[in-house]
Amino acid sequence: MWLRLQRRHKGKVKRQKREPPNEEQMKAAILNHTQEELNEIDPGWQIFILEGSDGGMGVWPYWYMQHELAPLLGWNRINYATRSTQNDRYTDFWVGKMREDMVPSLTLDGFTGAPINFTTMIYVEGNRTLLEKGCRSIQRLFLSVREDIVEAIDEYMKENHPTSYEGASNNGLGMEDTSFHLSSAVAQLSRTMDVRTFWNASVCNIHCAFRNHIAELVDSIPQRHPHAGIQTNTEVVGYIHSHGRNNVHPDFIRGMLTTKIIVLAQRDRWEGHSRLFEALLSGALIMSDPQVYWPHGTIDGENIVVYNSWVDLELKILYYLDPKNDEERMRIGQRGREVALTHHRPWQQAERLFLNDMTYKNDCGLANKPW
């Protein structure tokens, strides 16, 4: 911004142009305001910091908000959303104990973490809590449904099951609703493979002890139950690592849509992964290890099945592969796909965050104050 200064010189008024204030000058001017004054400046103007890394960023975001952002902007407009809302997940310790003690019934209780209580979080300066010092709210951020996976499944159904696709698309409500109305047909597809993991130790070696151990156990089910006729597969299908996060391989879509049960296992030290919504979209029955926070609407026994030990996982696999329970298995698979499409598309999660829909607040120690 240009400032105009006037002064008399030899009987004339001359205008002197001055350069706009630099960053340090602006910062010095702002820092003369109290937090109360900053918070009152256009309080409807809110800032959202979204941190979506796997293992979190340590204490840096908290320090930055409290010591850099709040002094400039006021804490009452800063809202922080992070995937890292639990501590003390050590499922690799569970694997070590399993191998040492050989107790298949050892539960995951105590190994899957506990919620971080941000409402009482004390940071650096004695009794100053982060909330109402560094930011207004801290909320749980979930990964969202991948739209390319949704589209790839729609295309698979259109090409391989045109009658079902046409029936779903004749609702007159657009592609979003076509995907939803396909859920029943997707869940009831004929599936030739009983159980898949889509990973093994050949591609996962960082914080993967638990994930790899579960794959080994799933792979060994046919040997332990030779008369059950169960087929398991732990092969990696399609793209892997970052390439797989940004591209869709048709073999991956075909693999998911021809599998009855997909078993998931998370990393050793943090929870949440893209595999959850990818798998739910497939309409297969999804089995997962426990986590502290579940995406909104995800309910054990209704749209997902949670296992808490190796024995628990094996018994549930045997139960849901019993032909007598086919309808229940497909019903849970359909509901899993529906909850993913109804609540976890990118725009749905954004609306809950930015519009502050208190219906979806987390109650386990997270602050979510209205703004």
Image (tube, rainbow, N blue to C red):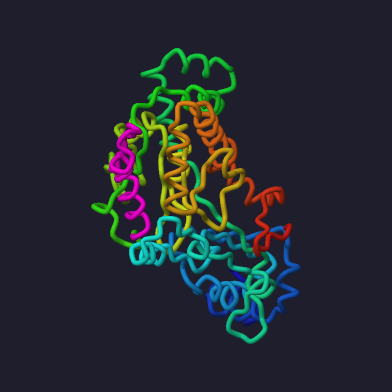
View extreme (front): residue: 227
Q: Position of residue 89 (x, y in %)?
A: 47, 65
- State how many labels appear: 0
Give the farthest residue toward the left. 202
Q: Nearer the viewer, residue 321 or 186?
A: 321
> In the figure, is residue 258 to the left or right of 336?
left
* Near-viewer residue (268 or 354): 268
Q: In this view, does 4 lie to the left or right of 318?
A: right
Asked where in the image residue 30 lies, by quadrant, the reply is bottom right
Q: Inspect the magenta stretch and tell me whether residue 17 lies in it.
A: no
- Image position, residue 17 (x, y; %): 56, 73
| Left or right placement of residue 346 versus residue 242 in this view | right
Q: Residue at x 57, y 55 (%)?
A: 293
**Is 36 positioned to the left or the right of 315 in the image?**
right
Seen as rendered, the residue at the extreme top is 163
Q: Where is residue 6 in the image (x, y as percent from the top left)?
A: 66, 76
Query: To which quarter of the image does residue 342 belong?
Result: top right
Image quarter in which the C terminus is found = bottom right
Magenta residues, dominant SS class: helix
Residues shaded magenta = 209-234
Which residue sits at x=39%, y=66%? 97
Vertical arrangement, residue 197 with respect to residue 194, above or below: below
Please report the residue visible at 58 percent of the width from the left and 46 percent of the height from the top.
349
Can residue 11 be seen?
A: no
Q: Can residue 209 be seen in this view?
A: yes
Residue under the image location 63 percent in, 69 percent down: 118
**Of residues 272 and 150, the one drawn nearer to the viewer in this rendering:** 272
Q: Compared to 228, does 88 lie above or below?
A: below
Quarter in which the N terminus is drawn: bottom right
